[in-house]
Image (spheres, coloured by chain):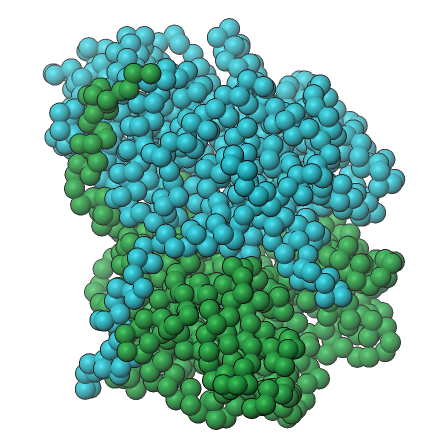
Chain colours: A green, B cyan
Amino acid sequence: MAAANGGGEADHLAGERATAQFDVDGMKVAWAGSRHALEVADRMACLVASDPVFRKDTRTMLSRKELFKDTLKKAAHAWKRTVELHLTEEEANLLRLYIDQPGYVDLHWVMFVPSIKGQGTEEQQKKWLTMAYKFQIIGTYAQTELGHGSNVQGLETTATFDPSTDEFIMHSPTLTSSKWWPGGLGKTSTHAVVYARLITEGKDYGIHGFIMQLRSLDDHSPLLGITIGDIGGKFGSGAYNSMDNGVMRLDHVRIPRDQMLMRLSQVTREGKYVHSDVPKQLLYGTMVYVRQTIVADSARASSRAVCIAVRYSAIRKQFGSKAGGPEIQVLNYKTQQSRLFPLLASAYAFRFVGQWLKWLYTDVTQKLEAKDFSTLPEAHACTAGLKSVTTSATADAIEECQKLCGGHGYLNSSGLPELFAVNLPACTYEGDNVVLLLQVARFLMKTISQVASGKQPVGTTAYMGNIQHLMQCKSVVKTVEDWLSPAAIKEVFEARALRMAVNCAQNISKAPSQEEGFSELSPDLLEAAVAHVQLIIVTKFIEKLQEDIPGHGVKEQLQKLCGIYALHLIHKHLGDFLSTGCVTARQGALANEQLGKLYAQVRPNVVALVDAFDYTDHYLGSALGRYDGDVYSALYKEAWKDPLNETVVPDGYQEHLRPLLKQQLKLSRL
Amino acid sequence: MAAANGGGEADHLAGERATAQFDVDGMKVAWAGSRHALEVADRMACLVASDPVFRKDTRTMLSRKELFKDTLKKAAHAWKRTVELHLTEEEANLLRLYIDQPGYVDLHWVMFVPSIKGQGTEEQQKKWLTMAYKFQIIGTYAQTELGHGSNVQGLETTATFDPSTDEFIMHSPTLTSSKWWPGGLGKTSTHAVVYARLITEGKDYGIHGFIMQLRSLDDHSPLLGITIGDIGGKFGSGAYNSMDNGVMRLDHVRIPRDQMLMRLSQVTREGKYVHSDVPKQLLYGTMVYVRQTIVADSARASSRAVCIAVRYSAIRKQFGSKAGGPEIQVLNYKTQQSRLFPLLASAYAFRFVGQWLKWLYTDVTQKLEAKDFSTLPEAHACTAGLKSVTTSATADAIEECQKLCGGHGYLNSSGLPELFAVNLPACTYEGDNVVLLLQVARFLMKTISQVASGKQPVGTTAYMGNIQHLMQCKSVVKTVEDWLSPAAIKEVFEARALRMAVNCAQNISKAPSQEEGFSELSPDLLEAAVAHVQLIIVTKFIEKLQEDIPGHGVKEQLQKLCGIYALHLIHKHLGDFLSTGCVTARQGALANEQLGKLYAQVRPNVVALVDAFDYTDHYLGSALGRYDGDVYSALYKEAWKDPLNETVVPDGYQEHLRPLLKQQLKLSRL
């Protein structure tokens, strides 16, 4: 498999691997989702790891321009390999993923192509996608502006129809209307789907998408009236600096009328704005799709961080036992376990809820095709909430893993700084996490009012139908062991989520208006939304465990991880559980005690549990997370690659150090 | 003052400043600590801001080597200015602070010089400090090793006395004994205090400090037997990459016997190890000093982040009011307030506890000089705890501010990525925060057992003497207004902290041994330690408000911030307060309600409250945090400085983009 590095080198983690109480290969299949998924992922990961063009060990040492050029090179090489090897779409996506360097191709495939698929007419799709699929054009998605992010309706760019020439005039009327952030816009894309206010016959019809060519296909220079550039450096040494996020100003740029994306509405030759009979809801499918991929990314990112931290914690020793004996593995400290093991459990929890979301997306797609929009609001709220909770938790998890690795976690060679800088922005892009949680909260408030009027809630809100019981139930937990019952856990999470939501609804109803109440209560609503989403994650983990999971001991380990995930949330949010009366202080203490027992039980398995992610050393990109645990030699070796080490005496010594040391700084008399 | 930028430009935040209900100048004095402190800080900040050598707007765009050279240049220039202007020590320190670029001088002044002062004999001090004060030598502090961080006793480097030549032989016996991390070691320092196991007459006497010359004072080349280099890139674009954190291996390097730091113990000419009569406790003074400066740094870093986020949130608008009117200032959203205002309050809380720590340090110093060591353990626990809690909270605060600024927070031009990357490591250096909190917990356990045997606890643990009352009291809060009472707040914080500690103590006593119990309970002990430290911060804020604080409305605003700080902690840690029975669910809800009222009350003052930090635009280094609020022009202008924008068509187009677009990638036949 991918992770094993051939060559018969010493395995410093062999002792840890020997204590595993389950079939690691079976766990790999469970993590991957299927034997097939594991096989394809493994093959693509090895393909990337073995190709020198995809090396990334010096990425953080490159200047911005070098890094950007390296990204162009990798993208071209990846496409070359994709064509040469006749890779399937699944394989090509995995290839991109394991290359692990953000670039224009992400926007092309994940935003540009799907936008045209979703909003273009059949004719438009035929014309543009044919070119896009062959990379004859490179596209991006230009929505956000310098002064406008989450609120799409606030965009200022205009697309004014000129019937005299049958064209739209695309224009940036203000500085704040400059397009800002689109990946690939700055230096690479030849085309973009540009969002602008459609104005025709003197009337503003709001935001619509338009296909624009941005650059010459001959020499790549921006077309007339288009000012375009990169928005500058971003968080991290390498990270998203490989991406040319761009700024663009439009000065009365004309495009043909048929480059408006016309699947949902059109402007006629005469300038009339007309709606088609295609239902608007179809667009929501794309949103569910994109957010589902972000949840999958979160599981991957948090599992990478946890893999690094677990392996290094098994190697690293610190402080002796009482009697001055040898130092103790950091992984054996209870404080390390209580911080790290919940993150391990979360990675598994996010992975499984991500697998379920993939199913949800196909379910939604089928229903949309049958014009059944009934479950769409619930599916939308659920994916928005999961995107929010998993990305926030992942950013926190990576930062915590960095701290759990001590000082070395701050070195680029640990891989953690890059991982953090690449994943933190997911809290903001594709829907700011707080804005999304408020959407979830709004949906919850609506659901409660519907429950009150007798309507049965669906999907992940079905539990709210059980309001009579959940509003008054008390947990039956009496012993530490009782907390191992999935039913006991599910009940308290359901009761907590529902009671928090109902509290909010009651307080909103006391306000002068619904809107004022919602605004006033919004901090509480955020917490209620989080409680609801955590319930979804816990529930999907429990449901996963009701499936048949092959492999010796695999299900047993997952049961323990599920327990850790749920019980650590009870401990962390104890205030919620106590103040809503679902749990007593005594029961909270028992939950905490059970948590400690579960930590001890998974301890011998944790290295094998991160091996099951099946990550190559290339993909991890971490001296601390190496499969063979040969951490210190790797750190030492990496250090010498730094450009500062090219000379023994540093550049600047003659000008700035020697005069100081020799007391020869030229002083001015004042 | 510093913050006001002359020139009569439009002030986009003038409206916000006009609503302030207090005397901003008075608040500046309160923040600075005194009129004198404000004046000096302001003068030094302006000196730095007006000097072109200290520009830092392109810092994140430099390569590692360019950035390092820039640091050398700034350090030399700072020293030149210090000498030219005859700056006092206070002024010189502030100059360095406002230059805001980590470099070798930090280690020289904060670690090398104090180590020799603390551990050197008078003769040694005279010899080495004379040179150090003039920068004839540059020193660093070489303690940590590749395989050894927190546990100083685990260091492997050896210093073996050779009586035949009257020398110590300094040696790195293993790879893991390589010195690793010391700032300034990699490329700059000519000397270091090196920690090593002292071996004489065949016996290992444990870790001692030695002064070593590392590099030639003629040509800066490393001395014979010394292999030395930089440990490689670190978190962030610029951040700590300006510092040459180093690796060093020693191959039987000989130094004269008199370079052992001999204030506390000596090796005689014959090789006898002897203790002096200087008490070991004197060394603790340095530790208290260094950690006190870190708490001050935390207050500065979190206030910088908050200043940026508050100003930008006042400028940024998002979403309309219900009727489709103009967009609303982000600062008016309750969710923004509930995330941002507690960080504003925390910055003030950390600042005031930092001022108190400064007093504590002088108090400790006086007592040490009088050989009174009675309050040392308490002072040590208190500073260790405050270092831990404030640095962790500060890292979180900066990250939260980044998120609160939406997408733009991830741009280097926002200043936030750099601020985060520079401050996150404070959670680990100078004592890992978890290790420090466990030291606090150990002290708390000891204090409880002493209280049980009738000994009166001192200083910040004095409240533990009130155990009878605090173990059974119930908060008397009945109304929202009752939570404005400092006494009511103090009581619940005291009761929570004490009860958590006592719970731990009781559970430890049930374990087979004290050590096993402490280890088993360590996750709970961490939480008890945090509760104790938060009590200290709340208490010192309340005590500050009992002083005379001049300026119209200044004290009133600080009272509100104090309330926000305390009540947001009650909300955040509600599980603690409820499970220990200090507070009922109903009282918790009232606290939350009062919190919302305080947010509304400080809202008109928040821009003025961050103005009171008196930061120059240079020091903030943020397009989003500009004093004049002209955010979007600044972001736009900064973007074009990026090296990627030097050409319209990017480097790499001919090799990697054009062949792709033109379908001319050279494919291999497989």
Figure check: A420 above or below B556 = below
Residue B369 seen:
yes
Give the camera-side residue of B120 and B516: B120
Residue B220 position by quadrant: top left
**Residue B665: image location, x then y, percent:** 23, 80
Of the pair B580 and A306, the residue shown nearer to us: A306
**Height in image: A570 above or below B35?**
below
Q: Residue at x 41, y 69 (%)?
A: A226
- Residue at left offset 37%, top offset 17%: B85
Q: Residue drawn 38% across and 72% down?
A: A224
Point 28% across, 78% down: residue: A218
Please provide percent x and percent y for residue A606: 45, 59
The image position of residue B155, as x and y in percent, is 32, 33
Q: Is residue A605 visible?
A: no
Camera-nearest residue between A104 and B317: B317
Horizontal side of residue A535 vs B104, given as left or right: right
Residue nearer the viewer, A515 or B42:
B42
How many numbered dots are placed on residues in this image? 0
Quarter of the image where the C terminus of chain A is located: top left
Task: Specify the quadrant of the image occupied by residue B139.
Answer: top left
Q: To which quarter of the image does residue A622 belong?
A: bottom left
In the rendered image, the residue lying farthest to the front is A164
Whole-percent x, y for residue A259 in the image: 48, 84
From the image, which quarter does the N terminus of chain A lie in? bottom left
Residue A346 lies left or right of residue A644; in this view the side is right
